[in-house]
Image (spheres, rainbow, N blue to C red):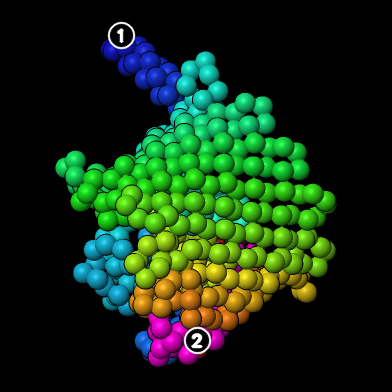
Amino acid sequence: MKRIIVLALAACMVLGAAFSASAAEFKASGFLYAGYDYLNVDNTGKTNDFSQRFRSQIDIVASESLSGTVFFEIDQTWGHANGNIGNNSGGALGADGVNIETKRAYMTFLVPSTSVQVRAGIQGLALPGAVAGSPVINHDVAAIVASTSFGKVDATAFFARPYDADASSTTADLFGAIVSANLDVVTVSPYIMVSNNGHDSGALNGNEAQWYGVAVEATPVENLTLAFDGIYGAVESQDDGFFLAGKAAYATDFAVPAFLAWYGSGNDSDGEGIMPTLEGLDFVPCTLVGFGAAATSSDALFGSAIGKWGVSLQASEMSFIEKVSHTVRATYIRGTNDDSLAADIENWSDDDSAFEFDFVTTYAAYDNLDIIVDLAYAVTDLDDAAPSTDDVFKAAIGAQYNF
């Protein structure tokens, strides 16, 4: 009997040592949001939704050289069933929706005896965007990304596969490189990305494309930040396009006032000349152009900044009361596409325009709880794109718990 006990203890010690040797630290972060969103658009009527979103990122850290990450999301619109399967399901009576999204799942490791970091798996991939985000791509995608540093210069190379339907003609691959040089008061980040698309792939109608760009951020004097983005993009057998954006912001004790402007080339009467993009909604000059909502409420009503130009006066981090801050934006937007190509409220001709006014208030009720009020009003003149639309009004209020 004693011999059995000794053997059992020895086995426990061996197993304990094995588990200890492979132990990893788990770190969780994310947020939970719930709120109400009201949208009134002349040509589609009024909508009002209650929605919620849960995002959780779990990092499994073995060491400074090795970790894994999984990122989950659950979205629900209250009252929506959607068959209780898929995104935004499970909000109806009884709930119980099968709606967990795998946003990201990747490993990160250092190549032994080098300073090269490799990240492989479904991850967030973004090209540089100094002004207001990237208008080309900032999305989750299956990719391999390698990066390293040489003094004040960071270098990144990546391969991504956004589309693959089990046939060579349906496969799309992305290849790119980014170099970022920190020159004290100026940071310059040139980059290149090319797509190798099968003719039946979901990317750019099966056409191959290429992008060349640079993002520049400078702080010439204290509190003043200047930013610039310049991008050239071309699709095979079509006219090329470009996108330019600039921003100047000055930080004061009261607020951070800023001036932002952009120009995105549009299509001519032959349907060519607009810059190609894989998503385009992450350049955010205001609430209704791009993914500009302060929380999980309606945005991108006017589509992307591609095929439009605009100027915006902004002020962020304004505070009159402790724990309460405001962001104010006044933006003029106009299309750059030929008159014959205006299709809907997202695709404008050079005769379509709008004035948009945004007001966002955030109350930090606790260290980890924000109450957000998000208001936007736009006066439109969309004679070609959406003639029946005059005004757009959006109002949202929600609570976000960050952990």
- Residue situated in front as seen by the camera: 178 or 16: 178
Report the disc number at residue 282: none
- Residue situated in front as seen by the camera: 360 or 264: 264
Query: Is residue 367 found inside the magenta-colored segment of the image?
Result: yes
Q: Mark 1, residues whose alpha carbon is within 10 Å: few (<14), some, or many (≥20)? A: few
Does residue 393 appear in the picture of this structure? Answer: no
Q: Residue at 31% x, 63% y: name it.
A: 87
Q: Quadrant of the C terminus?
A: bottom right
Q: Mark 2, residues whose alpha carbon is within 10 Å: few (<14), some, or many (≥20)? A: some
Does residue 39 appear in the picture of this structure? Answer: yes
Q: Residue at 29% x, 67% y: name it.
A: 89
Q: Where does the magenta region start and end?
A: 365-390
Hey, what amino acid is under mark 2? Asp
SS at circle 1 = helix
Q: Position of residue 225 (x, y in %)?
A: 74, 54
* Residue position marked by numbered label 1 in the rendering: 3
* Residue position marked by numbered label 2 in the rendering: 381
- Residue situated in front as seen by the camera: 27 or 246: 246
- Residue situated in front as seen by the camera: 3 or 291: 291
Q: Residue at 74% x, 67% y: name it.
A: 257
Work out which residue is located at the far top of the displayed protein and give it: 3
